């Protein structure tokens, strides 16, 4: 074995001893150590030393990165990030997260209307309702660090109690103040900078027994399962009632809106890719009117065709 090969091997052994403790590997230190072990004065050996030291540095960093990303060393088991469900936690994306606590107190619900605050995450956006108005926004997630931006809501006037109105305002404020999230089983909690729990949700759950929600109307939301945004989306139900849902980004869901007489499908109009698109039912022969509850019309747009899939939520 040549002197250069021996130096190279010694350098690797040194990196392997240091990396598990995540100690930094100093390039100058490795070079000086190598020079001390072999004093040949040859330009080729000096060049070899530099290459060996650089390789040792890269190898050490690579090993350190692998250790830091290895299962069990981070927080992957504590937070289910986008597309990252764990064995014991619900995935962040997919479920409708229904509010159960706000500011450390049980959430309040409108028993007559069946409305309650909820939140749904897609890959880059959030959507939901504050119990009256629909909410949309963007978010970024880095580990368990959360940043919600561009949060906007509709401006529907709802006949609500003082408690519901106060909760509606607090809900939006707390979403904007949230900087961290954690998922424990089917429970999602959002925290502020001090670590105080602002909002607590349950995945697809109904409100707690202390605050029952009785759905007495037909409520329908829309979901855009296309790759293109849908603008000016409106649904006209069988009795002629027209409900405007506005713009729906790809993968986004709207808030629930009270429908008229509704079936498993309806007339849907939208602007997609700059053109007006329409889903026109021929008739409702053989169909049965929907009973009070919550439903989703899942919209897809492919090759110029707007289609609808019906889903029962509650």
Image (cartoon, rainbow, N blue to C red):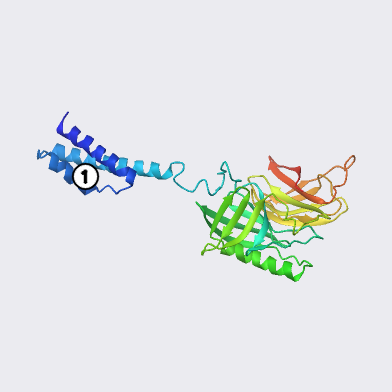
Farthest residue, direction right: 285
- Where residue 281 appears, as percent x and y from the top left, is 83, 44
Q: Is any atom of residue 221 visible in this view? A: yes
- Where residue 64 appears, as percent x and y from the top left, is 35, 44
Whether 227 is drawn above or below 182: the answer is above
Foreground pick, 275 / 181: 181
Labels in figure, total: 1
- Where residue 197 appears, as percent x and y from the top left, is 58, 61
**In this rendering, position of residue 191 left or right of residue 96:** left
Disc 1, SS:
helix
On the rendered image, what quadrant is the N terminus found in? top left
Q: Is any atom of residue 273 visible in this view? A: no
Farthest residue, direction front: 210
**In this rendering, position of residue 4 left or right of residue 285:** left
**In this rendering, position of residue 94 left or right of residue 245:** left
What is the crowding at mark 1: few (fewer than 14 residues within 10 Å), some, or many (at least 20)? Answer: many
Foreground pick, 4 / 79: 79
Foreground pick, 152 / 188: 188
Whether 281 is drawn above or below 176: the answer is above
Say which residue appears at 69% left-offset and 66% top-offset: 167
Whether 137 is drawn above or below 37: the answer is below
Say which residue appears at 77% left-offset and 66% top-offset: 158
Farthest residue, direction top: 1
- Where residue 104 appears, as percent x and y from the top left, is 63, 63
Residue under label 1, please give it. 30
Say which residue appears at 65% left-offset and 67% top-offset: 170
Say which residue appears at 56% left-offset and 53% top-offset: 182
């Amino acid at each position: 074995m040549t002197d250069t090969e021996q130096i190279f091997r010694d350098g690797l052994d040194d990196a392997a001893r240091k990396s598990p403790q995540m100690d930094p590997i100093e390039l100058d230190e490795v070079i000086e150590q190598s020079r001390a072990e072999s004093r040949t004065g040859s330009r080729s050996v000096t060049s070899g030393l530099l290459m060996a030291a650089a390789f040792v540095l890269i190898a050490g960093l690579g090993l350190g990165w692998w250790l830091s990303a290895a299962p069990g060393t981070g927080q992957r088991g504590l937070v289910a990030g986008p597309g990252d469900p764990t064995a014991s936690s619900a995935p962040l994306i997919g479920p409708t997260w229904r509010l159960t606590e706000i500011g450390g107190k049980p959430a309040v619900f409108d028993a007559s209307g069946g409305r309650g605050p909820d939140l749904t995450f897609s890959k880059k956006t959030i959507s939901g309702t504050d119990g009256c108005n629909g909410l949309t926004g963007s978010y970024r997630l880095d580990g368990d660090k959360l940043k919600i931006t561009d949060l906007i809501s509709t401006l529907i006037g709802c006949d609500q109690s003082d408690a519901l109105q106060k909760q509606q305002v607090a809900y939006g404020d707390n979403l904007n103040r949230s900087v961290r999230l954690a998922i424990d089983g089917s429970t999602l909690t959002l925290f502020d900078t001090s670590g105080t729990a602002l909002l607590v949700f349950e995945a697809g759950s109904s409100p707690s027994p202390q605050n029952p929600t009785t759905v007495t109307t037909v409520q329908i939301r829309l979901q855009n399962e296309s790759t293109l945004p849908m603008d000016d989306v409106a649904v006209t139900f069988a009795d002629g009632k027209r409900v405007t849902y506005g713009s729906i980004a790809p993968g986004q869901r709207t808030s629930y809106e009270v429908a008229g007489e509704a079936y498993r499908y309806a007339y849907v109009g939208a602007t997609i890719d700059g053109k007006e698109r329409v889903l026109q039912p021929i008739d409702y022969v053989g169909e049965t009117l929907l009973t009070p509850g919550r439903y989703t019309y899942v919209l897809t747009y492919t090759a110029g065709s707007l289609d609808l899939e019906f889903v029962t939520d509650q």
